[in-house]
Amino acid sequence: MNGYDFTFAGELLTALGSGALWWRERRLLCVSDLHLGKSERIARRGGTPLPPYEVTDTLDRLSSDLERTKPETVICLGDSFDDAEAARALPEPARLRIATLQAGLRWVWIEGNHDPGPVDIGGTHLRELTLGPLLFRHIAQDGAQGEISGHYHPKAALRLRGRNLTRPAFLVDTARVVLPAYGTYTGGLRSDAPVLTALMRPGALAIVTGATPHAVPMPR
C-alpha cells in the first residue's frame, strides 16, 4: 500500500497516495471533499460544462482504496456532495454503486458547508465525530486538539528537478491534520495561502500525495 506513516495524537496514521487517511488500529478509512455531482451543479447553474465522469472516477478510486484497506468504518469528512440538489440528482447507477460500497461497513457522512443536512442515502449523518483521541469534523476550529478536518483542499507547491510542481497534500502539525480533497475536479488551495499559514503551527508538514507519498516542510 503506497502511504506515508506518521504519529498523531499518539495514534499511527497513514496518508495514502490517493488522498485518503488510513487508521489501521481502528480499521478506519477517512476521505474528504468528494464533491459528488460537481459537473451537474455547474451545468445546472449555466457554467462551462465539465466532462460528466467525475462521480464515476471518484467512486472508482474510493472502491480501490476500500478493496486495499478492507476497513470496518468509513468517514466522509464533509462536502461529499457539491450541494443538496446535486445529491438529489445523483444518477441511480451512482446511488446503487454507493450502496454497494457501503455494504457491511459503518459509514459516516460528516456535514460540510456544501452539504449541511442529511441526504437520502445510506449511512449515518453527523456534525462531527470523536473516536478515541481524534475528532473528525469538516472545518478546522481554533484551539482544537487531535482534529482531523478537510474543507480547504490543500495543495503544496514544490520545485523538483528544475520544475515547479503542485500536488494535493495533507497538512499535519501537532494539533490537526487537514486532508486534501478526494474528489475529481475539486481544485485546491496552496499551503502558502494566508488562511493555511495562520491555521497550521510552525513546523507543520505537507505530505504530498501521488505514487510515493512523502513529507516536506509545509511551504509557506
Image (cartoon, rainbow, N blue to C red):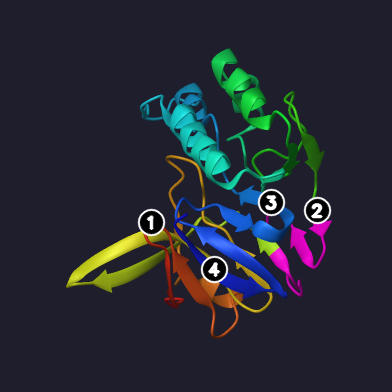
Q: Is mark 2 on a helix, strand or loop?
A: strand
Residue named by callout 3: 28
Give the number of the disc on residue 5.
Answer: 4
Q: Residue at x 43, y 49 (%)?
A: 187
Q: CA separation, marks 4 and 2?
A: 23 Å
Instruction: Specify the quadrant that holds the C terminus.
Output: bottom left
Place of residue 75 in the rendered image (x, y in percent of width and height, measured from the top left): 69, 46
Q: Can see residue 139?
A: yes
- The tag on residue 129 is 2
Q: Which amino acid does label 4 sit on?
A: Asp
Q: What residue type is labelled 2?
A: Leu
* Residue 145 included in the magenta stretch of the image: yes
Taking 91 as reference, is 121 left or right? right
Q: Judging from the image, what secondary structure is the residue with disc 4 in?
A: strand
Q: Counting other residues with Cα less than 10 Å from the Cα at mark 1, is it few (<14), some (14-19), or many (20 or more)?
A: some
Q: Looking at the picture, how far across and down is residue 151, in whole percent? A: 60, 54
Residue 214 forms part of the magenta stretch: no
Helix, strand or loop under label 3: strand
List x then y, in percent, for residue 5: 54, 68
Is 161 displayed left or right of 62 in the figure? Answer: left
Residue extent of the magenta highlight:
130-147
